[in-house]
């Protein structure tokens, strides 16, 4: 097969594919294939790809298995059970994810008739993983994706940068006012039971921490996992329930012992459980919703998610306190 980099553009399998790889027929013996490989030059030779007369992919034989085989063994007897393959238009993240899940060093690229077009080699897969990792780190740092839009956001004049960021921060400012109003609404409760105020910073902080942690893990999971978005979201929500219940259980007895008030301990624990679950849901949903709406999650998910978590945490805490303590 002749080698050329694909002429396709974009972050797809075709962009990383090489064409010159060793191929053989199913009936060829190990000795025949090894003899043909000797003295030949390939872009990737970590496996021999079994094809039929129409170059349709029929099997993959790792080079280590070929060299260790009896010389008279036909290639089809050496082929591995799994036959992972992608099409030229497959997103590069999915190609790398497939390689990880199938534990294969390279991924064949086929057309809609399963004809072998080339292979995405190991170095290309490593480069894809590196790029996606850097992209995710940039997103989590608030720099956005490695794209023309991200570069424009960084290189734009200060007035343009402020215009991009201020709307979300104004939403945060409005949320801060709302949070202040929530606390002011429960002023009487705070005056009657000063101990109620002791737990506000802890509740708000833990909700923020859970939400931020969830966003980081969700971004990484969406990049590398082949699960549907719905399953990823439901999995994170269940995780939030587990985290919330664990924090609630761990906080109950120390509060009860220190303040000698079982109602207060119960209220704080329940508030932690609910706030933790809500924060997890917000942390996984907000970036996804903003992306679906065509908005850059780097600008909006942090300020918007934080203030929503703060306000809801305060409401949850004071409602729980009012119901169980006051």
Image (cartoon, grey):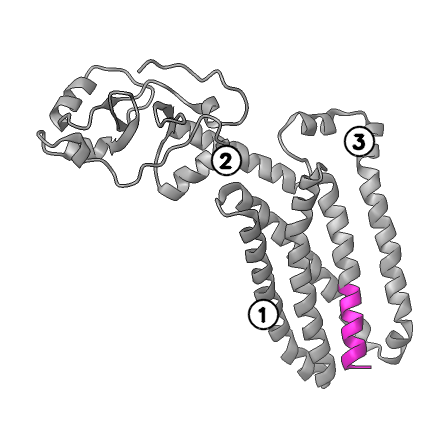
Seen in the picture, residue 192 relative to 31 is either above or below; the reply is below
Give how far across and how far down residue 233 sits, in percent: 59, 53
Question: Comparing marks 3 and 2, which lies closer to the viewer?
Answer: 2
| Residue drawn 65% across the image and 45% down it | 288
Picture disc at residue 93 = 2
Magenta stretch holds residue 323? yes
Q: Which residues are magenta?
A: 313-326
Residue bearing mark 3? 161
Determine if residue 307 is in view: yes
Query: Looking at the rendering, which quadrant does residue 142 occupy?
Result: top right
> On screen, 188 above or below 310?
below
Disc 1: which residue? 246
Separation (CA) of disc 3 from disc 1: 41 Å
Label 1, residues with CA under 10 Å away: few <14, some 14-19, many ≥20: some
Tell me the CA gap for discs 3 and 2: 30 Å
Q: Which mark is residue 125?
A: none
Task: Using the image, determine if residue 48 lies above or below residue 315.
Answer: above
Q: Which numbered disc, 3 or 2, marks the residue that appears first in the sequence?
A: 2
**Circle nearer the N terminus (1, 2):** 2
Residue plotted at (11% across, 32% down) = 73
Q: Is residue 188 left or right of residue 255?
A: right
Residue 160 drawn at (x, y percent)? 82, 28
Image side of residue 173 versus residue 226, left or right: right
């Amino acid at each position: 097969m002749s080698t050329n980099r694909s002429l396709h553009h974009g972050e797809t399998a075709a962009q990383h594919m090489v064409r010159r790889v060793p191929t053989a027929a199913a009936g060829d013996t190990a000795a025949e294939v090894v003899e043909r490989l000797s003295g030949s030059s390939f872009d990737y030779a970590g496996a021999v790809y079994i094809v039929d007369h129409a170059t349709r992919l029929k099997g993959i034989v790792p080079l280590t298995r070929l060299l260790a085989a009896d010389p008279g063994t036909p290639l089809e007897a050496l082929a591995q059970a799994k036959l992972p393959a992608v099409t030229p238009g497959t997103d590069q993240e999915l190609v790398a994810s497939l390689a990880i899940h199938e534990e294969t060093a390279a991924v064949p690229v086929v057309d809609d008739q399963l004809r072998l077009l080339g292979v995405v080699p190991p170095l290309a897969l490593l480069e894809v993983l590196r790029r996606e990792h850097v992209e995710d780190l940039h997103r989590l740092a608030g720099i956005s994706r490695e794209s023309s839009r991200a570069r424009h956001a960084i290189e734009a004049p200060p007035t343009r940068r402020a215009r991009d960021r201020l709307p979300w921060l104004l939403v945060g400012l409005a949320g801060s006012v709302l949070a202040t109003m929530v606390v002011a609404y429960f002023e009487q409760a705070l005056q009657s039971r000063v101990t109620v105020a002791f737990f506000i910073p802890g509740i708000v902080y833990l909700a923020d921490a859970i939400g931020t942690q969830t966003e980081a893990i969700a971004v990484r999971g969406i990049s590398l996992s082949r699960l549907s978005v719905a399953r990823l979201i439901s999995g994170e929500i269940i995780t939030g329930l587990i985290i919330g219940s664990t924090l609630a259980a761990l906080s109950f007895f120390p509060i009860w012992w220190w303040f000698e008030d079982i109602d207060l301990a119960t209220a704080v624990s329940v508030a932690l459980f609910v706030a933790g679950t809500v924060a997890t849901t917000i942390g996984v949903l907000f970036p996804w919703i903003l992306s679906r709406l065509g908005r850059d999650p780097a600008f909006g998910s942090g300020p918007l998610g934080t203030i929503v978590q703060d306000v809801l945490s305060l409401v949850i805490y004071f409602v729980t306190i009012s119901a169980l303590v006051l």
